[in-house]
Amino acid sequence: EQLPVAELRRRFASDFVWGVATSAFQIEGAARADGKGPSIWDDFCRVPGAIADGGTGDVACDHYHRLESDLDLIADLGVTAYRFSICWPRVQPGGQGAYNERGIEFYERLVDGLLERNIRPYATLYHWDLPAELQRLNGGWLARDTAYRFAEYAEVISRRLGDRVVSIATHNEPWVSAVLGYERGVFAPGVKDRRVAYQASHHLLLSHGLAMQAIRAAGVRADVGIVLNMSPVRPATDSELDAHHARLEDGRLVRWYTDAVFKGQYPTDIVEHLGADAPVVQAGDAGLIAQPCDFVGINYYHPTVSSSSNPASPASSGAAVTDMGWEVAPRSLCDLLLRLKRDYQLPPIYITENGAAYRDQLVDGRIEDEQRRQYIESHLLAVAEAIEHGVDVRGYFVWSLMDNFEWAEGYRKRFGIVHVDYATLRRTLKRSGLWYRSLLKTATV
Ligand code: GBH
């Protein structure tokens, strides 16, 4: 059953930030337009078998060429904020050296277009699309030098956009970049080597710290922080062995990042567990990584269930799952937020991503996605509960504004509250989008 939108809305402060989120590679297309350089995802899409449906980012949602109408679409939802990412090789094709003015101008048009429509721009500097040239030259995030290249790019963007965007996140989900990119090899750059993944993660975190410094030095007005993917990890059974696996998985997935950024040290149990695979860390790195953030973004989708046979399953058996096979567990989001409050002194929190893939049904020209609507509603209730318990959550962004390129799954999985017909690229608001709009447009008081 559906809660009256006014009732749900009343559980949030009047200045709560309501948004939708996207990322550059997943929606922009225009892979070679206006001087853009290739990214590691452009290359990865060409590896046979890497993408389930053989899709690429060449066209995606063609957002790059449909900016004005997409801005109107975003405004029509009634959101107060829009989270997007900047494609590094679009603004600096080789990842070092010359910048591409036409690429930067695209993001200026995006930001100005949002501001004209009274929507606050939340920018992310890195949502996985590293300039391919940096991969080719020195192995991408395996090279310490890439962290310094990233900080320079961060500074240039900050000088150009830092007075107009309200928020700059350095990275989106460094766990994904390091583990899926360098350990499991299911994401770009497709490296499968446990021994190097933590070195990559260290360089990603170091780049966050160096970028924080560079962005602050640029004198931005925006809040600056990082976006982390999180999942509360629970043991599959009450056996001591499963509890052990759950502790380790929590360490790899959550504490590795939160301890580094907010406590200034890697968790010692994980460093010990890694042994010879622990990253090489230079003196001073820990302090660099742990600079004060103005906010932390949390992306939450599903809980993680740990056992000796599967240390990181996205669902317990028999649970309701989305089209990704991820367990629907709103309570876990509340638990996660309460746990973070207990264990860390965090800056204000934004839920920078939350949402679900489902197969939408077309009924009389309307797109029915009641499951997605329910997913969003139940997770908002979980956020409200956490806030009522004193967690400082300032905003919520639905993933995603529209169906888009879902990485290794290609275009087969749909996360949008707006449907995209890939044959015509027509956008149509789904039932969940209509509902989100009614929630956002509900008069409060
Ligand atoms: C986000 O990451 C991304 O930021 C966004 O680009 C993407 O489109 C969106 O999610 C939807 O996928 O290996 O089966 O155990 C998601 C973070 C963390 C979710 C790891 C899946 C592991 C699932 N992901 N989690 S599994």
Image (spheres, rainbow, N blue to C red):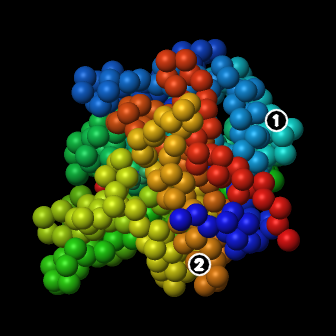
Distance from disc 2 to disc 1, alpha carbons, whole Å, reads: 35 Å
Q: Secondary structure at mark 2?
A: helix
**Residue 166's spot in the image, x, y percent?**
76, 52
Residue found 41% across the figure and 23% down from its top: 56
Q: Which amino acid lies under the numbered mark 2 shown in the image of this protein?
A: Glu
Residue 263 visible? The answer is no
**Residue 409's spot in the image, x, y percent?**
35, 36
Left or right, 200 with reference to 362: left
Identify the mark at residue 58; answer none if there is no mark. Answer: none
CB-based contact (under 8 Å), mark 2 and mark 1: no
**Residue 117's spot in the image, x, y percent?**
84, 40
Ligand 1 lies under 8 Å from the Cβ of mark 1: no
Q: Nearer the viewer, residue 195 or 86?
A: 86
Instruction: Look at mark 2 in the image and give the residue it sits on.
Output: 385
Residue found 53% across the figure and 65% down from its top: 1
Q: Residue furthest front?
A: 364
The mark that comes first in sequence, 2 or 1, is 1
Instruction: Look at mark 1 in the image and give the residue it sits on.
Output: 112
Residue found 71% across the figure and 39% down from its top: 74
Q: Secondary structure at mark 1?
A: helix
Front of the two marks 2 and 1? 2
Q: Which amino acid lies under the numbered mark 1 shown in the image of this protein?
A: Asp
Q: Is residue 175 above or below residue 256?
A: above
Left or right, 81 with reference to 362: right
